[in-house]
Amino acid sequence: MRNFNYSEIKNQKWDSQVLGLIAAIYKEAGKQELYLKQRPAELEKLVEIAKVQSTEASNAIEGIVTTDTRIRQLVEEKTAPKNRNEQEIAGYRDALSVIHENFDAIPITQNYILQLHKIMYGHMNNPMAGKTKNVQNYITATYPDGHTETLFTPLSPFETPEALDKICEEYNRVIGNMEVEPLIAIPIFIHDFLCIHPFNDGNGRMSRLLTALLLYRSGFYVGKYISLEAKISKNKDLYYDVLGKAQIGWYEGKEDKVLFIKYLLGTILSAYKDFQERFELVEEKLPALDVVRKATMMKIGRFTKQDIRELCPSLSLSSIEGAIRKLVEAGEIKREGKGKNICYYRVK
């Protein structure tokens, strides 16, 4: 089995891009702290939007979907799931809520990771919920002509419990001793977790839950307000491409860690930038029409009502719809499409 020793990371020289991303994230995290003190009530609405988006996007990456209405009912109203997909979605909602509310009391150990996995499958009759895999799994790709290729073979079921223990121990040691910068250690832990692929099912979703948990525990709260899962989902192909390349040489300890580190740090920084944009819209006490007008000015090209809703968490849906209608009537924006395909773009 591969040797896990995170102490080796502390002596590694990082290029200017990695160091620049880390510096930028710390700067944005500091700004966010000030914002949270100034306008906690308005920003609480961002939390609710992010929960819906994170639950929807993390499941959608794995092909688990339902309607927009049902996603909102499942996450916001905690209604009972009606089918298998909704059971999976409700389980992710529950695990994410546990992390949001208790991250500081969830140690990074195999036992707690297994408990989170069990919560994620809490609405299903899955005998492997909360247990490491009992069959060999493979990371595969299916191509347009229908043929499938194995891209990576994770650790065997026999090796998995020890490896999961080891990455938790190493992570806790280097973070506890302040040997390694958390923004370096977190992507490495998540990448190792994905290479171990410890469960029969749910590895991708668990990796995204653990990303949120590790970031919150290290003081980076952006994922509470802006969905990291939605950012990953929007460019899913890049996510899989980076993962695939970063897995080469993993067994020998020769994988390119930098690829995945840059990818994850870039995603985190992008979320912080989005947070600042949304804060600017709740910061001023403006009439709904002016808030929506400012939001449309932040969009380039076509945008949907949902895009504007995300930028204006302090407004009700009816206020947003009314403002959009007035902007269309005033000729500031144009509407096109029908039904679910309705979108808008600025003309002034």
Image: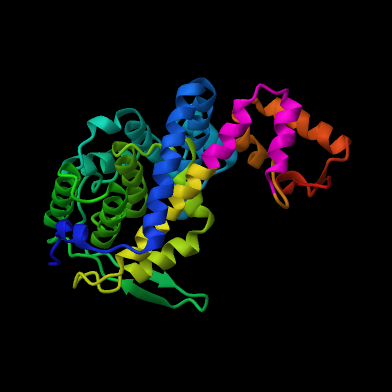
Quadrant of the frame with the C terminus: top right
Q: At 36% across and 56% down in the image, what residue appears?
A: 19
Q: How many marks?
A: 0
- Residue bounds of the magenta highlight: 274-299
Query: Magenta stretch: residue 279 in it?
Result: yes
Colour scheme: rainbow
Residue 56 picture location, percent across and down? 49, 44
- Prevalent SS, magenta region: helix
Q: In this view, does 125 lie above or below 72?
A: below
**Residue 256 shows in this picture:** yes
Residue 18 picture location, percent across and down? 37, 59
* Viewer-closest of 341 and 189: 189
Would residue 320 be found to the left or right of residue 32 on screen? right
Would residue 324 be found to the left or right of residue 95 on screen? right
Q: Which residue lies furthest to the right in this view?
A: 330
* Viewer-closest of 21 and 163: 21
Residue 250 picture location, percent across and down? 24, 69
Residue 119 picture location, percent across and down? 30, 37
The image quarter in which residue 172 lies:
top left
Q: At 88% across and 35% down in the image, what residue appears?
A: 330
**Residue 78 shows in this picture:** no
Would residue 266 be found to the left or right of residue 163 on screen? right
Q: At 52% across and 38% down in the image, what residue appears?
A: 275
Q: At 23% across and 72% down in the image, what residue appears?
A: 254
Quadrant of the frame with the N terminus: bottom left
Query: Magenta stretch: residue 110 in it?
Result: no
